[in-house]
Every structure is written in C-alpha cells, then in structure tokens.
Image: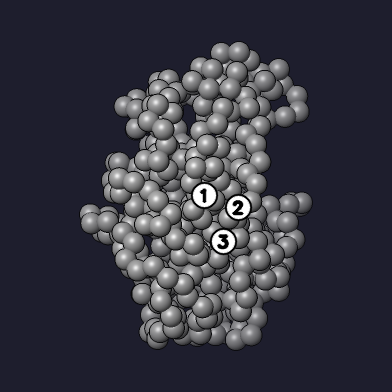
Amino acid sequence: MMEKLTKKTFFPSASCLLPPAFCLLAIYGCAKRVIPSTTVVKTEPVMKEELSQVKPLPGEQEAQNRWTPQLEAEFQMRAREAIKYYAGRGYGNTHGENEKRSYPFAMFDFLAGNQKQALEFLQSEDAEARDNRHTGGIDYYYSFTLKVQIRKYFFFGQFLNPDYRQRMFAGAKKWTEEDPKGRPHPIYGKGKGGNGWGPEVRGGWVDGRNTDNLRAMREVGVYLMAEETGNEDTRLLYKQKLHRYVWALYHIGMGEWDSENYLGHTFAAYLNLYDFAQDQEVKQLGKAALDWMAAAAALKYYRGGFGGPTKRDYGKGNVVYGSNTARLFSLYFGDVTSPNPKPERDIIHLITSNYRPPAAVVALARKQFDKPVEILATKPIYENWKPGGEEQPAYWETSFFSNTYQLGTVAAKFADGDVGTFKL
C-alpha cells in the first residue's frame, strides 16, 4: 500500500486504473482502441501499444475468476475511457439520495488525478446532517447512498482524513448496534407517511424499500458495517438475509429479472460484498451472486445492446448502449465497434474491484457458441420472498440466437405493465 498519493506516481493522465488497495501498477501508458474479434479462450493479441496493467495483491487470487491477458487489457482500455469521460466534471450535491450520482462523479475525478477536490467533496458535511445526527452526521439512510458510502469507506478510506473515517466508523457502529430496518428514527419515528422516500415520510434508520437493487444495497451495507464495527448479532442476521437472497438466485431467479435499468445497481452492491467482506463464506456468497448476475446479463447482452424480455423495462435496450445495464456490462463484455458514449456511473465499482466474470460468461455475452439455438427459461414473481413466491414460475421465456440476430419473448398468466415482452 502506498504511503503517499501523487498524480505522478500513481494516477498519470489517461492511464490510471486501480488504487493500491487491490493492485500494483506495473506499466504506465496508453493504448489505441482496437475492437476484439477473437474468441475469449483462444486469444490473439489485439492491443498494439503500451498498456496499463494491474496485478492483484498476493492472497486475493484464489477467489478470482481467471482471465486472459487480452481480456484484462481490453477491460483496462475501456476503464480509461470511462475515467476520462467523467474527469473534471461537476459533482452535484448530497441532498436526499443524490450521492448516487455525486459520489461516483467525485470518485472518477479522484482516479483522474483531481484528488484534493474529490476528497474535499467526499468528506463534506451532508445536506441532511441534522437528520443523521444519531450517526454522526453520516448518511446511512438511503440505499443508493449506502452503495457508494460503503466504497468510500472501505476503498477510498485510506485517503480520507483519519478523523473523518473514524466518524464514519463511530456512526456505523451506532447504526448497526441493532437492525436499522424498522427501528424508529430518533426524530421522525416511523414517519408521517405519504409521498416520498426520506426518513420524515418512511421513518426508520435505513431505507426499507424492497426492490432487488435497493434491498441489495441495504443488506450488503448493513452487513459490511456490522462486520467492520463488531456488531455480531446484526452481522449474523444479515448474513442470513444475504444467504437467502443468493439461494433464491440459483433456485428460482431474481424478482427484478434482467432489468435493463436496475440489474447493474444490484450487481454493483454485491461487488461491495465481494470486495470488502472479511468472512470468507460471505465473500463466496458475493462471488456466487456476481457470477449469476453476470451470466444473466451475458445472455441478453448483444454487442452493446440488451435484447430479450426484461422486468422493469424502459424500452431502450435493443439499441447499442441504449440501456444502463448494457452500458455497465460493456466494461466486461466489450464486443462493440465504438466507445461507450455515456459510461454508467456504477462502473466506478467495476473499475475499483478485482472481480471479473468467468471467461465462459464473457464468451456467452459475445455469443461464441454454435448457432442457431433456442433457450427456454422461467422467471419468478416479483415479490418472491412472500408466501407462495417460491412455488411456481410467473413468466415463461423463449430466446432465440442466430448467426446475425437474437430475439426473445415472454408469456405470463397476468398483465404486467413494466415487463418488456419482446425484443429483437
């Protein structure tokens, strides 16, 4: 771990990648963008100039999926493009859950070399510090904020002011001394009800919404901070919750299945678990979840698009870089003839993580298998954790892959307004 961070020694322009918590920077430089046409397993060199390469720190490799040097070089090239895209932009503010945008913007800017400005913002007083006095003014309420708050503490923590990091620790210790979900808020109790998602409306010590992505951000965040601060009862409770969720992925699927907008948010939350959990069993749960979600994304991914039926559909996935999920997973999967015009902000989690999907999943995303082929699948009901939710499928999906296109359609026994039923 480096003792001193300087732009010259660690984040040179256009070649910065991962801070030293996860890697050792071996070679600095730039690379031209060359689109791969080779297969994932049998690779040939496609990067012709100097590369920025990273090596995982010793002791972390056994939990990693193996990649070829070519796949890693392509990943790092796209990572540089994302960092360059966000460098020097304004951050925004910390009102409500706006940290879901402003914190990633600051983190990208940090990687681009503007460390002082980024750190000042990441440690600035929260807009709702009064509502969060019980956690030292640190916002541990909103799920979207939690996702980046966790990465700020664990990954960028080595660069934070020690007093500020201690303040985050003390706030988290109080926050997880018992289950924060449903615990009456010190000011607002159980909330006044009505429209809105803040503590004054919903109450509690943490955002209680239960969509897959919001639940993942909450449960991972509570688990990691309970583990960090030694609140063992809360840690074990949330370990059970995480175990049940990952069990459900492999046994029945995801309620927010294949969402072209939200799958990446759930994925980014579980990157936090994989990267920062100390309990190796929980770390493996994180990896299992990530492998599953990466495979689900790979099946629908097609050269920067996202084809086939999806839950919580926004109608944008069947064009290149049209959906958030495609723009996020393109960092891993590539196979596109143009750079990502608007990298998804959650890419900050991918860039600062050692996780890589299995090589077979990348091959699936690039459709490197014999075609034509048809795949039949089922999907669960959205709120599958409720009684009866595990008993039978709610949707029946057919996907078809040819040599030049892919399409998919889905059928259900009931009308469902947020499902995209067909894509070509």
Q: Which residue is mark 2?
A: 88
Asked if disc 2 and disc 1 are in contact, CB closer than 8 Å, the reply is yes
Residue positioned 27% across, 56% down in the render: 57
Amino acid under label 2? Gly
239 on left or right of 194: left
Q: Which quadrant would residue 397 be assigned to in this image? A: bottom right
Q: Which residue is mark 1?
A: 114
Q: Which residue is mark 3?
A: 84
Residue 295: image location, x then y, percent: 48, 64
Residue 212: image location, x then y, percent: 57, 45
Disc 1 or disc 3, which is closer to the eye? 1
Q: Report the front residue among 388 and 371.
A: 371
Return the residue found at the far front: 8
Quote the CA–CA distance across marks 3 and 2.
9 Å
Q: Residues within 10 Å of mark 3 (few under 14, many from 20)?
A: some
Q: Quadrant of the C terminus?
A: bottom right
Residue 353: image location, x then y, percent: 41, 54
Q: Report the front residue among 352 and 254.
A: 352
Residue positioned 63% across, 44% down in the render: 91
Secondary element under disc 3, as helix, strand or loop, is helix
Looking at the image, residue 42 lies above or below residue 6: below
Residue 151: image location, x then y, percent: 45, 43
